[in-house]
Structures are given as structure tokens and as C-alpha cells.
Image (tube, coloured by chain):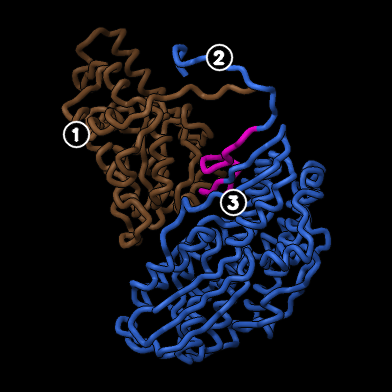
Amino acid sequence: MKEIKVENRREGNILSRVFDELNEFCRARSLFILHYCTGCGAIELPPVMTSRFDMERLGVQPMVTPRQADILLITGYVSIKTLKRVMLTYEQMGSPKYVIGICSCTVNGGMYWQSYATAKKLDEYMPVDLYIAGCMPRPEAIISGLRSLIRNIELGESNNWKKYYENYDYYLGNQQKLFGDEWQTPVDVIGEAEHYGLVGEGTYGEHTEILQRVQQPLKPLEMRL
Amino acid sequence: MRAENYQQQSHPPSNQFELNFGPNHPGIEGNYALQVEVEGDVIVKARADGGYLHRGFEKLMEQRLWIQNISLVPRICVPDPSPMEVCYSMAIEEISGIEVPERAQWIRVLQLELSRIAAHLFTFGGHAATTGMYTPMYWGVADRDLILDLFEEFTGGRIYSIYNLPGGVRRELPDGFLDKVSEVIDYIESRLPEYDNLFFRNAVFIKRAKGVGVLTQEKSLEMGVTGPNLRATGLAFDLRRDDPYLVYDKLDFEVVVEEAGDAWARTLVRRQELLQSIRIVRQVVAALPDIGGELRAPIPNPLAWRVPAGESYARVESSKGELAYFVVSNGGEKPWRVHVRGPSAMHAVQVLEELVTGGRVEDVAQTMFSLDACPPEVDR
């Protein structure tokens, strides 16, 4: 996965250049949002989805399964119990994937900054592409946020999902602080990083050592008819 | 699963499975989960699994000033936030003995009833979507947006209005606002026959909803069911009539009752309540121009307000059921204890578990929507 900057792209082969641009053009215009409402910001999503604000005109649609979705919307505060599910969901999603943090609570804890039950900064647990601040942001703000995400994807600037592989140790360390040292997910992130050539300086570290020490090998699912 | 991980195992044939229904599930209402054991399609055991939205509200409220909590309480129930702030303000007014001016009371009724219409329209849309009908969802959300526009105009916020203070309301209605209210209300009333034809009299919906999730009157009283769900079992109990607060005793409306107690009856009660709320809003719109006076009673400096020691229990009828605040003050700057009695805590846990057991998997979502449970309020 060699990264070619936008300004250098024109120097390459014409055919591959056309193909790359077509690829990003199409990717930016067919985005599926995972249908997972984590907090109160989800109440503004039905107006965005339905006829009044209609995000489908941008090519954005809700999708029910994580493996087919491109965008993970974190709509508001995430309690620690939800954050576990969010992490599982995020790691299941296929790359390239984008995370949008809606509402102030994902930025800095919002009005629950004192709460014992919520995770304050979403950025510590997964790389976030875009924040839409407000409590709660209006549908117009969500639409404009989606539009800037689309623009970023088209320009090839929205590559935060690679940071998760490159700095896996940092993100895993923050997760272990919340969930305990036994925390593990079914997805082999280090293996994926090696496979796709995304190993960075922060992929390995003290926290991944803890993970490798305590990791239970995955068992096959019980098949029953 | 990778091929090298797969080992074939033989099991006795069985049709029993465990299913995680939610939290990431399009049929569930909000961030909430049910763990069900199914035998084929029939549910033999269900366990509600909440806590995904827990923020520790009651603890947070003990750490903030009395006035700061006004902006915190609407977050407890997101689809229907207005009763929260009104009820909390009523509880404080009762402790400190503040008399609310009449005009403020009428404006509060207007706010509560508009919020109820918005919440019912939203539930109606979501409920239709669980039975596979997506057009009513589009209609319900679009018509609810008209009311949100009204809220935006007179309170400043689409969803969370934060319009009330202990002692009254914050500011005067904008010019020409009542005309806009009657325009929107007329429009929504003209839409009701279309809703009937599309959804409430739809053969698909009737077949799916009739006889599903039947609650008897004894059972519902045992389990603390309130609001439209209780009225759908044949008991005419409505706090607005039986324990009137604000100015509801001066208003003319009917308490809607259905006998069957199933999902169909619960939906019909909400449908009729839309009409009753429209009636109430019309009366308020007609009466408000003649009622003058102050908007709020004088209160001490809100940032250094020490509410006198005492305790109070205020309750209102929200769109989900009976909502109550138990507030204890020890004379300090912050509440000593606030307890929220939310209707959905009963509806979404014990009642939902009871109703889905013995039913079919495809009816779980519908049962949850017909109970109109509100997950953020369950977890708080």
C-alpha cells in the first residue's frame, strides 16, 4: 500500500492515475453509515436520513452490519460498556474506514466530564477523522460534516484509519487502562498491520507485549445445526 | 473463520439458540440489548441487558448547583425532554414554596403538549418501521420536524429546550408565535386521516400487532406500568386528570382508553392521544393572549441559591408514562439527593422481558416500540 500524494499523482502512469482518481471519486460517493446509536445525538439522525435533510442525495446511507459499513458514527457520549462494543465493531469494519465523532461528549467528555461511567476523549481509543461539535449538532451541521468528509476522501486526506495500525500500542494501552490487562478482541490487529505493510513505530510496545502474554488463542465457533 | 481453525464437531440436533438482540441492531430502540434464548422462532427466555447508556445522572446532579441541573435533566429522556425540566422545576418550587405565575403555567402546558405530540409522532414512525413499513417513518419524522421548528423558535433549541427555571419560564413567546402553532397543529390534524389509511388501518399492521404482547390490567398494576400502556389495558388513569398539575384542571380533554392491552391497543391509545393533545394545544392558544402577568416568580441569585431544607415528590404525565422526581435538599447549594422515577425503567426491563417470552423473534422489536420505551431513561 504505497502512499502517493495527491500532487505527485499526476506524474505517474496516466492509466493508473485515471484509475486512482476514479477509485476515490467512487469511494467518496458511496458511503455506508453503520446503524449504531451510541448516545443522545442519534435523535438527530432520523431527520438527517429522511426526506427533510436527506443524506441519501450525498450517497450516504445507513447500513446494518459493521463489515459492510464505511463510517462509524459515534453519536454522543460512550459509556465504558458501550466503548467495548464500539471497539469490537470498529476492528471488524473493513478498511478504509472513517470515524465521525458527533456531539461535544466525544471531543472532551462534554457535560459528563465528571461522570464515572463514560469515556471522555474518543481520540484516545480510536483515530477520529472528523468531529462535529454541538449539543446536539443540528442536521445541517451533520450534513456539512459529511460533505467535508467526502471532500477529504476525494482528496485522499482522510487516512486516519492507518494510524490505528501504526500506533496500535498507544490505543491498546488506553483500552487496557479502562478494561483491564485481560482485554482482547477477536481481530488480530498486529497480524493485519504486518500483512498490509502498515507497521509503524508505534505498532509494538509494552502494551502489545502484555496482550501477547495474556492473549487466549481464538477458538473456532461452535457449529450447531 | 479461517480454514485451519475449523474442526468439525458433531452435536445432537437442536433448535435451541442464544441470540444477542442488540445493542447494534436496527430493530432495537436506541442503545439497548436483549439476550434471548430461542427454540426455533419462539422465545423461551429473555433477559434485558441495559447499562449501555449509563452516565450516573443521579450522582452528577448531586455535584452541581440547583440551576445547573436544569441543563442536565433533559438529557435523561432524549425523545421527550420537556417533561423532565418541568418536573424538576416543579419539585424545587414545592420545596422552596415558590408560586408560579399563571402565564408561565400555561406556557409550560403548551410546551409539554407540543413535546408529547412530537414524541408520539416519532414513536409512530419507528413502530411502523419495525413492521416493514418505511413510508410512515418518513412521514412521522418529517411532521415531528415541524414541531421541532416551533421549539427552536420559542426556546432556542430543537431538541433540548432548557426553557424552564424554578419559578417560571425564561422568556416571552415570540411575536406571532401562536398563529404559527395553530397552523402547524391544523396541518398535523389534517394528516391524521392519512396516517390512519397508511398505517393504523393497514391490514399488515393489524395482523402483526393484534394479540402480540398482551398485558392484563392486574399484571400491569403489579409491574408498575403507567401512561398509555396502562390506559391500553382498560384503566382510565391519567395524572393530568387524576392528580392535576399546572393548569390541566382548567382544560377540557378526554382520557383515552382501550381494552385489549396488546400492541395494537397501545398504538391506538397513542393515536387518539395525538388528537387530545391537539385539543389541549388549541385551548392554550385561545387562552394565552388574555392571560397577562409575570413570566417567573422572583428567585434568589441562581448561582448562590440555597434551596431550604426539605424534600418533595413531583410527578407529571410524560408521553411514556408517569415521570417523577424525588428531590431532597439539606439547605445547601446543591441537591442532597435526586431520584428520577422514569416510566421506561419498568417498561423496558421487567415488562418487556415478560411480554416477549413465549412470543416470536420477529415481534421483539415491535413489542419494544409499542411499549414506547426510552433506553437513556432506563439506564440514566
Q: Which circle marks residue B8 in the picture?
A: 2
Front: mark 3 or 1: 1
Residue A86, percent across and down?
A: 41, 40
Chain A visual colour = brown
For label 1, the residue is: A206
Q: Position of residue B293 (x, y in %)?
A: 51, 90
Q: Colour of chain B?
A: blue
**SS assignment for the magenta stretch, majority:** loop
Q: Secondary structure at mark 3?
A: helix
Q: For the residue carrying disc 2, how many other residues have a C-alpha within 10 Å: few (<14), some (14-19), or many (20+)?
A: few
Say above or below: A214 vs B279.
Answer: above
Whether tag 3 and tag 2 are in contact, CB under 8 A, the answer is no
Q: Is residue B122 visible?
A: yes
Q: Amino acid at mark 2?
A: Gln
Q: Residue at x 51, y 40 (%)?
A: B24
Q: Quadrant of the N terminus of chain A?
A: top left
- Camera sees residue A128: no
Earlier residue among tags 3 and 2: 2
